[in-house]
Amino acid sequence: MVPQQLIRKAEEFVDSGGFFAELAAMVAYATESARPEGRLALDAYLDEVLSPALVGLGCHVTRYESSGSMGGPFLLGTRIESPDLPTVLCYGHADVVEGQAGRWSEGRDPWTLTAEGERWYGRGAADNKGQHLVNLAALRLLLAERGALGFNLKFLFESGEEIGSPGLAEFAATHRAELRADVLVASDGPRLDAGTPTLFLGSRGGVQLLLDAGLRAGSYHSGNWGGVLRNPATTLAAAIATLVDGHGRIRVPALLPPAVPDAVREALTGVGVAGSPGDPVPDDGWGEPGLSAAERLYAWNALEVLSLGAGDVDHPVNAIPGRARAVLQLRYVVGTDVGRVAEAVAEHLAEQGFPMVDVRLLGNFAASRTPLDDPWARWARTTLEQVAGRPVAVLPNIGGSLPNAVFTDVLGLPTLWLPHSYPGCLQHAPDEHLLASVAREGLVLATGFFHTLGHPPAGHPLPARP
């Protein structure tokens, strides 16, 4: 059992304002990985915030520079209590998306944590500084209470997750020995909803495609040439409609996943989508027929049009544009063959009479998932439900994407993600925020989880080590 005084200390750390103050100091670093000036802030954040936090946990801290031109440094803290104990690898990312200053409501500054009710506004508050602070604080509380964690700890921070984690897979492959562990325990992404403690085991992948109908160098008067010249905007709209119809159903077999596994379907039974105030309502009749909203989000593929343009929508002229372009994204689950996605789309469009539409791959990040029947997944669910005192939603993966494949495929680890945010947190947008209630419960859950992992009761042993 988790000592009640430890749970109270976790609650008090949030209630006293200590968590808020520490998060405010973190948010003040403008660690934007997509901007050159953000690299300086990232260096300072690693050196002045994360390194001291890891040293405070009794870790030996090593900084590794990325070998790639785009990637930033990696920070690894290691605390070995005994070779006979299990080893936990934790992960977080120090970088954030662009602050988008001037676009936040009520004149908020993205780099100043602002409390309004239970919403704590600031860039990185939810993604990912607030989330890795929960885990750092939980480990700190456990160490102060027991004098030892009861397991070996390795905590990895990267500084380029928001730009696609460049160099992370190569780093993991090169440093397998330093990263060797029994399980990954990390926090990112959202809960199922604000009120539901959640454990997820992986993430969907994503393939981004550029469709380009560049038919001629200039535009031509629509009165003089309408009905004679092929319109690239009309062509592109029709071409997209052969890929995904007006009801969100994918029309190309090569872009579809295998059937939903029975274990995944069972896990998603009764799982709702959009359960928080302010969430949009899922549209009836949208997406693959015969699937629940949860199955469409967590167990199926979606082909989304992210941008579509031709001419000037705000100031149209009477001319047939010479070019139309669109960016599409295939969000896909484990089991989908994405090795030839761009070629398959180009071949399909040619068969449908649109060989003039060029298809180019812009990027791809892998889908991955720890099996639902993995012993660590079962152990984690039981532990978290004991700490929470109520059911925990276990998702095969989230709908978004994380570098989970680095840990499952490169390092061969079971992966447990305990998120401390919710779908309406506005991450990547103005007014990103962390909910105080989620932070408070998240710290209790993480503290109880790590305590049980380090001091498992006789009736709830850890999974056997390989």
Image (cartoon, rainbow, N blue to C red):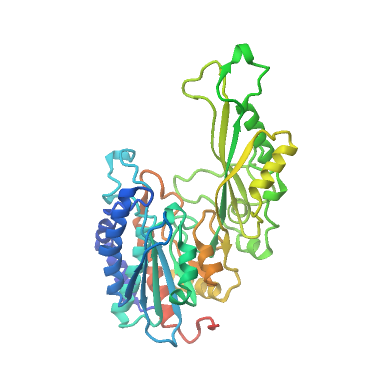
Name the side, left or right, on which 369 lies relative to 142: right
Residue 334 x/y as whole percent: 62, 60
Q: Count the labels in the image.
A: 0
Residue at left 67%, top 46%? 343
Q: In this view, does 89 lie to the left or right of 249?
A: left
For the N terminus, the image quarter is: bottom left
The residue furthest top is 224
Residue 41, percent from left and from top? 29, 54
Q: Is residue 61 left or right of residue 404?
A: left
Which image quadrant: the C terminus? bottom right
163 lies above or below 172:
above
**Residue extending furthest toward the right:** 351
Residue 198 visible in the shown view = no
Quadrant in the picture for residue 236? top right
Residue 312 location, x and y as percent? 49, 24
Nearest the viewer among 133 and 6 is: 133
Q: Which residue is drawn at 70% across and 57% down?
A: 258
Query: Taking the image as drawn, is residue 202 in sight?
Result: yes
Q: Nearer the viewer, residue 284 or 4?
A: 284
Residue 143, given in percent of the width and then of the height, sits at 31, 78
Q: In this rendering, is residue 112 above or below 152? A: above
Vertical order, 347 against 188 (above or below): above
